[in-house]
Image (cartoon, helix red, strand yellow):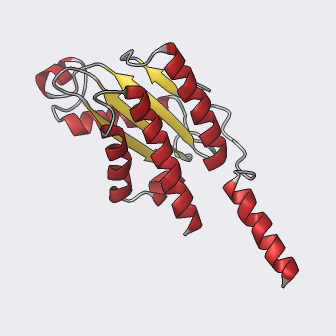
Amino acid sequence: IGILAVICIVLWMTKKTGGDNVRTNGESPAERVYDYAAVLTEGEAEDLRRYIKEQEQQLGIDIVILTINQPVEGDEAVGQGLQSRDWGRNMQALADDFWDENRFGYNKPFEGDGILLISNWYEGQEGETLSTSGKVEWAFSTYDIDSVLDAVYAYIGTDPYRAYKAYVDRVGDLLDSSIAS
């Protein structure tokens, strides 16, 4: 019984420390912070890159942040080449397309494990959407997705860096609890 207990503890510790999370997708770029809206300082972006890298190794998922500053609603969006006039559809399409074009996924391109937050800063059309894939898509309920977005909303208006860090933190918390259950 003692030996079995030691084996269980070792297996549990290995899972918690990410010991078995070996990245197998070599096709995606190493970059994880795409600040096209220029809302972060270079120091903040670099801090997020380091933090995301640690969390990716721990969780075994790609974690991506994409900021944009473009119309995604109404005639303006269609004029920019988007397929819909609907904000939500366009944001989701932009997030999913960015994921696919960059071949993200920790364990394989496209449908591999990971999550992407897209954050639009275009005046009057601000907001965030998530794109999930692989084990994140499987593990996250609508409630979990809302919980991640709520963590972002708590800070996005005053401190984008803190909002994006809260995104990474909340994803980690939710995945840790889904693995433990």
Residue 55 position in % (x across, y down)? 60, 41
Residue 115 in view, yes or no = no
**In screen coordinates, is 43 left or right of 72?**
right
**In screen coordinates, is 10 left or right of 39?**
right
Residue 119 position in % (x across, y down)? 34, 30
Q: Looking at the image, how many numbered discs can be counted on the residues?
A: 0
- From this view, report whether residue 85 is shown above or below residue 62: above
* Foreground pick, 21 / 18: 18
Q: Residue furthest left?
A: 75
Q: Residue furthest bottom?
A: 1
Which quadrant of the rendered structure holds the C terminus?
bottom right
Residue 164 in view, yes or no = yes
Picture residue at 28% right of the left edge, 29% below the top: 157
The quadrant in which residue 39 appears is top left
* Foreground pick, 48 / 107: 48
Q: Residue furthest right?
A: 3
Residue 102 position in % (x across, y down)? 52, 29
The quadrant in which residue 176 appears is bottom right
Which quadrant of the rendered structure holds the N terminus?
bottom right
- From this view, report whether residue 123 is shown above or below residue 64: above
Picture residue at 38% right of the left edge, 24% below the top: 67
**In screen coordinates, is 92 left or right of 137?**
left
Picture residue at 28% right of the left edge, 23% below the top: 121
- From this view, report whether residue 68 is shown above or below residue 53: above
Residue 53 position in % (x across, y down)? 62, 34
- From this view, report whether residue 84 is shown above or below residue 17: above
The quadrant in which residue 89 appears is top left
Picture residue at 19% right of the left edge, 27% below the top: 125
Q: Residue furthest front?
A: 158
* Foreground pick, 117 / 134: 117
